[in-house]
Amino acid sequence: MTRLLRTALALLVAPLLCAGALAQAPADCPPVAPEPTPDQLAAGTRDARDHGFLWRISRDGRSSWLYGTLHVAKLAWAFPGPAQRDALARSDTLALELDLLDPTLQARMAQALAAQPKVALPASLQARLDRQAQAECLPRQAIAALAPEMQVAVLATLAGRRDGFDAAYGIDAVLAGYGRAAKLDIVSLETPELQLRTLQMGSPAETVELVEGALAEMESGRARAALRRMATIWADGDLAELQRYESWCDCVKTAADRASLVRLLDERNPKLADSIAQLHAVGQRVFAAVGSLHMIGPTGLPTLMAQRGYRVERIVFPQKPQETRP
């Protein structure tokens, strides 16, 4: 899994940009994700199983929750299972990385995207990028105005559509809709500007290196395979395998890779933890849902909340892996 695919899994910006950008698919393209039918909604609600990773965090006589999400998913996974529904019912605030349904946030994101510096790629590399967009059935004009880092992030997010993983069913966006239906207070823990700064490379040479590496992974099929593996781990709630992420992701090979991981996770996690703690401290019962990679390691949110004086208990879901394998 390249640094870029890891970024696509750790940030919500790229999945949001996929919405509405895809071409009507010809025969050799994956279909555009349809709206669920009433029968699918009824069956999904009735048969929903818990997926992902859930912790109860308790302090001052109240409990809040940490939930590790997946930014692209299958329709069947988008329905909260019994443990998730119970935790949401016991919460009054839904805290997301970004509330993807907030029109004000969407406008800020558009402004921030327009303001991003845009590196001109070498002609041969731009041609490869254009071919990859075509391979993913994405109209070139849909991403042409974006910085190259964002262009490849969007394409990496699309890598799993032929396996049924779609940003339209991303767990964060689904929760934003669920929270509105349940009349929860919804807050964004981060800003679009922060997420875009996290993705921006430090120099034109680093941008070119990132785009070259990302395209090599997508062209070879390795990006698709890595996304499939990550989705399987999430669907099965396999925390042990998620915690071994660096041993199998093939994404921490250089000093630049390590710096990127620190920027994506280690530098963001304490701020996320502080924001969750502030909400809990003023009396709110918080269901905090962020990407699953924020939950692992010594700077993962469960560890950081324990360091802040919370009792942290993982909720283990009953699983039938054969039902969740992609």
Image (spheres, rainbow, N blue to C red):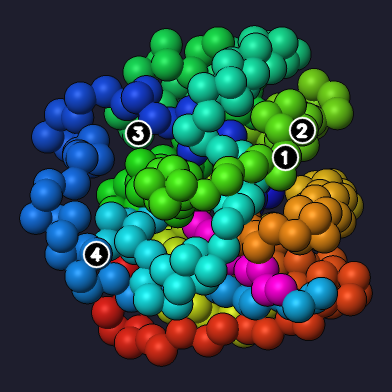
Residue at figure coordinates x 19%, y 29% from the top left: 25
Circle 4 — which element? helix
Q: Are marks 3 and 4 in contact (CB under 8 Å)?
A: no
Gap between marks 3 and 4, in whole Å? 31 Å
Tell me which amino acid carries mark 3. Answer: Glu
Q: Is residue 65 magenta?
A: yes
Is the Cβ of the residue at disc 1 closer than 8 Å to that at disc 2? yes
Report helix, strand or loop for mark 2: helix
In the displayed structure, would residue 106 be above or below residue 34? above
- Closer to the chain start, of discs 3 and 4, is 4
Q: Which of marks 3 and 4 is in front?
A: 4
**Residue under numbered circle 2:** 194
- Asked if the residue under mark 1 is in contact with the one under mark 4, i.e. CB atoms within 8 Å, the reply is no
Q: Which residue has dot 3 on it?
A: 136
> From where the camera sits, is residue 9 visible?
no
How far apart are the alpha carbons under marks 3 and 1? 29 Å
